[in-house]
Amino acid sequence: MQLAVHGGTPVLPTPHRFVWPRLTDDHRSAVNSLLDRVELSYYGREGEAEAVERLWSRRLEGRHTLAVTSGTAALHSAFYALGAEPGTEVICPTNTFLATLMPLVQTGATPVLADAEDDTGNIDPKSIRDAITPRTVGIAVTHLWGHPCDMDAIMQIADEHGLWVVEDCSHAHGARYHGREVGSIGDAAAISFQSAKLVFAGQGGMFAARDRETFERAVLLGHFRVRAQQDCTTELGRYASTGFGLNYRIHPLSAALARVSTEQMDPLIASRQAQLARLTERLSRIPGLRCPTTRTDCDRGAFYGYKLRLSGEWLNVPMAALVAALQAEGLDVHKPGSAPLHTTAFFTDEEVPVFRTRPAGRRRYQAGDFPVAERVWAESLSLPTFTFADEAPLVEAYADAFEKVHANLAAL
Ligand SMILES: Cc1ncc(COP(=O)(O)O)c(C=O)c1O
């Protein structure tokens, strides 16, 4: 069959556009009831914000939880509260979304990058060990595309060197490592509820801390006055009336969306995993396609992002030509957006404006420094995270299109 890019009939005559999220009546009525009551801001521990915090505390083994404006705010809160500051270094994955580590810039600490594991793309514990210096105070990890990091090895390194660990769970709502939900293993966790995530708020996030003092410092960073007065029960309470400078309070409407989507998340995870298992079953029959695998004793939970790895004959075709051919068949596929961070201007430029006065706050890198992360990214292709039973025909059509393109690779 002739490829659509060469004038043939596309597998999907109407191009598919992946749409997420789907709002339910529960989302609408939760938002409408806040609007009806004109409940549009929170200053204390109350309402929908408190409700979603309780749900996540229950999931995360009783962690102290704090709803915030975004996943980025949750990460900043975590770094700030754990003591990232000028002169300290925090080891972070190069293969992650920028927000896992860019909030460190606001604390003055130096992000030190580490390479990835080939199978999961997650931060490689061996590379963490290589990056440790006397200035290292912590490690940040991302459970990339829902796959938990190798937390036993990472916590072991942290224990040996007296380091704290921040888990970025933004891709991994409900994911489990050795039976424990991610976010309950390290010292603090951050979760994004941005609208592409399985648990969505539009914009919003959750911070979670193991110990009370870390939690109280995060409260003081972004929740001055009433909330700080309620929650800061240690000697930190003396700063409650001013806080430490920011307002990270979640909007009630966002909190309501997050609360409802948290209540709905487990069945959604199950149905997403079922659709993606079928996609894997079909695609793994095609030579050269490496489908996402999940290690024994791990569960990907929300499985944010289905990244196919190409190998063999697929790599003979330029990625742009391949994407164009698949898109011409009607597929919503693209190159993943986040290149390894060590290849971005922030880390490669000789000078970055924010560091003119304190250049020690940044390490410079160049392409080639982290070869595994670069290879993982170069060989990856993003597919939609099909979730609903009514998407089953699309799953089959996507697999059909990959079969068709595979049969015609030599023509591309
Ligand atoms: C891994 C990761 N961390 C952090 C964030 C930032 O979350 P937010 O957009 O809610 O600030 C994202 C957002 O996509 C993410 O993918």
Image: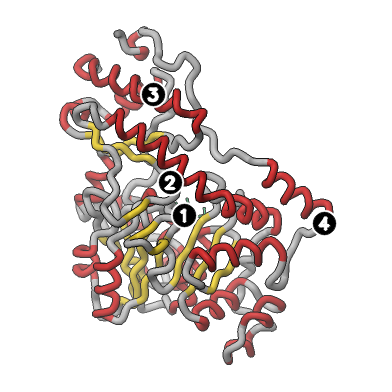
Q: Is residue 269 above or below residue 410?
A: below
Q: Amino acid at mark 3?
A: Glu
Q: Amino acid at mark 1?
A: His
How crowded pointer 4 is (Cα within 10 Å; few <14, some 14-19, many 20+) is rated as few
Residue found 48% across the figure and 37% down from its top:
387
Q: CA distance from mark 2 to mark 4?
A: 34 Å
Q: Amino acid at mark 2?
A: Tyr
Marks 2 & 1, CB-CB < 8 Å contact: yes
- Choose mark 4 or mark 1, whichever is in front: 1
Q: Which mark is residue 38?
A: 4
Is 150 left or right of 359, judged from the image as shown?
left
Residue behind label 2 places its C-beta within 8 angstroms of ligand 1: yes
How crowded pointer 1 is (Cα within 10 Å; few <14, some 14-19, many 20+) is rated as many
Residue found 68% across the figure and 82% down from its top:
229
Name the residue tied to disc 3. Answer: 396
Q: Is residue 147 above or below residue 102?
A: above
The image shows residue 227 at horizontal and vertical percentages of 67, 76
Residue behind label 3 places its C-beta within 8 angstroms of ligand 1: no
Which numbered disc, 4 or 1, marks the residue that appears first in the sequence? Answer: 4
Residue behind label 4 places its C-beta within 8 angstroms of ligand 1: no
Q: CA distance from mark 3 to mark 4?
A: 46 Å
Which numbered disc, 2 or 1, marks the residue that appears first in the sequence? Answer: 1
The image shows residue 305 at horizontal and vertical percentages of 40, 43
The image shows residue 317 at horizontal and vertical percentages of 22, 25
Which numbered disc, 3 or 4, marks the residue that appears first in the sequence? Answer: 4
Q: Which mark is residue 173?
A: 1
Q: CA distance from mark 2 to mark 1?
A: 9 Å
How crowded pointer 3 is (Cα within 10 Å; few <14, some 14-19, many 20+) is rated as some
Marks 2 & 4, CB-CB < 8 Å contact: no
Q: In this view of the protein, which residue sits in the foreground, 87 or 161? A: 161
Name the residue tied to disc 2. Answer: 304
